Every structure is written in structure tokens, then in C-alpha cells.
Image: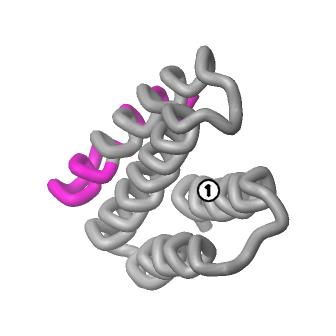
Amino acid sequence: MIVSYGIWMTFGSKLQTIGGAYMILSGVFMVLIAPVHDGKKPHDTLAFLTFFLFYVGSALYGLGSEKLLQKIVQPSILTLAIAGMFFKWPSDGYLELYGISLGMISSFLIGYRP
């Protein structure tokens, strides 16, 4: 689903196209997480890369957008994601839920057409 979302994002300016490519890479890393159990080093690395590529892709998409809302909110979500890594979470699952919540907000705002 992330890959198809990334393909949809490649139709736009150059920054939006680059952001869509990062989203496609994020989807590929999401598929690679499936065979690796939680708590192992490969899982943690792949999860980090998945979220990082997703947020960088959405930030680039927002910066390339013509809408002021996208230009402000998408890079802000990347900043919130980076700030979230420095909080003390009870477990890594909570951090992943935080990341998924930010990703849902980002996806909703990219798809939102007033």
C-alpha cells in the first residue's frame, strides 16, 4: 500500500517526485520487516529506516507542494518524529505507535484536498 501511495506521489514537482521515491523505498523496507521478529537488531534497523524514509519522503513532498499547509506541516511532522526518538518510551512498541500515528496524520494531510 505504501508503494502505491508513493507512486501516486511521484506525479508533481521534482521535490514531490523525490518524496514519492522515498515513500516507495519505505514500502520496500516495510516488506523486509515481515520475516524478522521484533526485538532483533535487523528488525530495529529496518523499522528505523522504514519510518525515516517515510518522514523524509513526506517532508520533501510537502516542501515541493504549492499549498502553504503542506509546506509547513509535513516538515513539522519530520521534526516531531525526530523529537519523539529522544523521549523515554516504556517499550519500542509505543515508539512505533507514535510513528504510525504521525504517518497517518501525514498521509491524511497529503491526501486532503479542500
Looking at the image, which residue is at 47% across and 42% down?
A: 45
Numbered disc 1: secondary structure: helix
Q: How many marks?
A: 1
Hey, which quadrant is residue 21 in on the image?
A: top left
Q: Which residue is mark 1?
A: 103
Does 15 sit left or right of 75 as displayed? left
- Single out the residue that lies furthest toward the left: 14
Q: The C terminus is located in which quarter?
A: bottom right
Q: Nearer the viewer, residue 105 or 37?
A: 37
Residue 65 sits above or below residue 104 on the image: below
- Residue 14 part of the magenta-drawn span: yes
Mark 1 neighbour class, 10 Å CA radius: few under 14, some 14 to 19, many 20 or more: some
Looking at the image, which residue is at 55% across and 81% down?
A: 83
Does 14 sit left or right of 73 as displayed? left
- Single out the residue that lies furthest toward the top: 35
Does 65 sit left or right of 49 as displayed? left
Q: Position of residue 36 (x, y in %)?
A: 60, 22
Q: Position of residue 84 (x, y in %)?
A: 62, 75
- Single out the residue that lies furthest toward the right: 90
| Figure coloring | one colour
Does 112 sit left or right of 56 as displayed? right
Q: Magenta span: helix, strand or loop, mainly?
A: helix
Looking at the image, which residue is at 57% across and 53% down?
A: 111
Looking at the image, which residue is at 42% across and 26% down?
A: 28
Q: Residues in magenta?
A: 1-19
Q: Position of residue 30 (x, y in %)?
A: 53, 31
Q: The N terminus is located in which quarter?
A: top right
- Residue 108 visible at all: no
- Residue 97 visible at all: yes
- Residue 36 part of the magenta-drawn span: no
Check disc 1 and give the amino acid type.
Gly
